[in-house]
Amino acid sequence: MSRTCSQFILATLLAFSALYGEALAQEQIMISYAGFGGFQAPIWAAKDLELFEKHGLNAEVLMIPGGSRSIQALLSGAIHFQQGGAPAVISAVVGGADVVMVATALNKFPYSIVAQKEIRKPSDLQGKKIGIVNFGGSNELAVVLALKEWGIPRQSVTLMPAGEAAVRLVAVANGALDATILSPPETLKAAELGMSTLAHLGEMKAAFPQIIIGTRRSFLQKNRETVKRFMRAYTEGIYELRTNKDKAMKVYAKRLRQTDTKVVEETCNYFATKFSFPPRLDREGLRNALSLIPQRSLKAAASADPEQYFDESVINELEKEGFFAGFLKATGR
């Protein structure tokens, strides 16, 4: 074997060893998300834009429907972080579980209220049937808070549990419901069917922690650097969604399995600017979320220190270190 060949093989082996060692150095983490709505995009962006790898993590993301299931997976150690709604974490904390919110990517309801075409303004909803997913969730609360903001008495409308978005859309189309609450891409279909859009709830006053990151408080205490690296990747993902439309649309097209550019763009435009950067919790939104706690637990929840539900110390550290300001400075924002 020639000297040149030997040197080439040695260099190749050294390069492979360095890459292999780097891969081993990246800590493995598991993260869940709750569904395929456009508001789930922050965790998709962090994964698909390889931001976890950038910040030294080997992350896998998986869909676990239902807040209680993801909390169970979190408590069992099967996952390290869960992206979902605040009520599941709040209920778990009230029940004494070792969980805490460390970030809030979306502090607004990601819904629009759509109605049959003859219903042109909010006051026209009085005496009408409004479809929601089910009672006791953020869907119902969004409608109730919208009615309150419009000055419409809750008792003047009939809220009806009507299942998933596609079913409710059909129910409005065939007259079984007068109105419902939808997110993109269903809102685009509603517009194509000639339905009225009465309000985009994300533009109204009502706040709600719709998308949060939960973890075990004990994991935060013992693995603070891991949580910090996760937060760097996660918040950079949010920033890309807000500022880079091409990247955002690629993420949405992949995750929604959508080839219709119009639908992807509509979804992207609807959600991008609504994500919070930095991902801090809106305290008013927390109070609204607390209202969803079952009545038997309400007293305990109301009397407790709100900070038992969230810990923003990692966000505070990143802000103090100039992590968020660095992005804003780079783009002149």
Image (tube, rainbow, N blue to C red):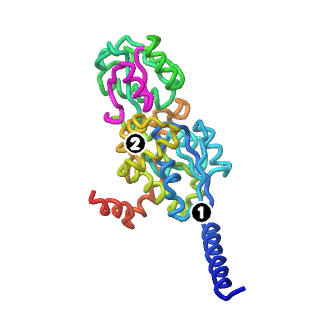
Residue ranking furthest to the right: 1
Q: Name which residue type carries label 2.
A: Asn
What's the residue type where badge 1 is placed?
Lys
Asked whether 320 or 133 is in front, the reply is: 133
Q: Nearer the viewer, mark 1 or mark 2?
A: 2
- The residue located at (49%, 58%) in the rendering is 51
**Residue indicated by mark 2:** 107
Residue 197 vs residue 42: left or right? Answer: left
Residue 279 in view, yes or no:
no
Per the model, the C-alpha gap separating discs 1 and 2 is 28 Å
Q: Is residue 185 magenta?
A: yes
- Please give the range of residues in magenta: 178-205
The residue that mark 1 highlights is: 222
| SS type, badge 1 | helix
Whether residue 207 is in magenta: the answer is no
Q: Left or right: where does residue 332 sit relative to residue 227?
A: left
Q: Quadrant of the C terminus?
A: bottom left
Q: How many marks?
A: 2
Classify 24 as above or below 251: below
Pointer 1 or 2: first along the chain: 2
From this view, report whether residue 66 is shown above or below residue 3. above
Residue 303 numbered tag = none
Residue 162 percent location from the top left of the image:
52, 19
Q: Nearer the viewer, residue 266 or 275?
A: 266
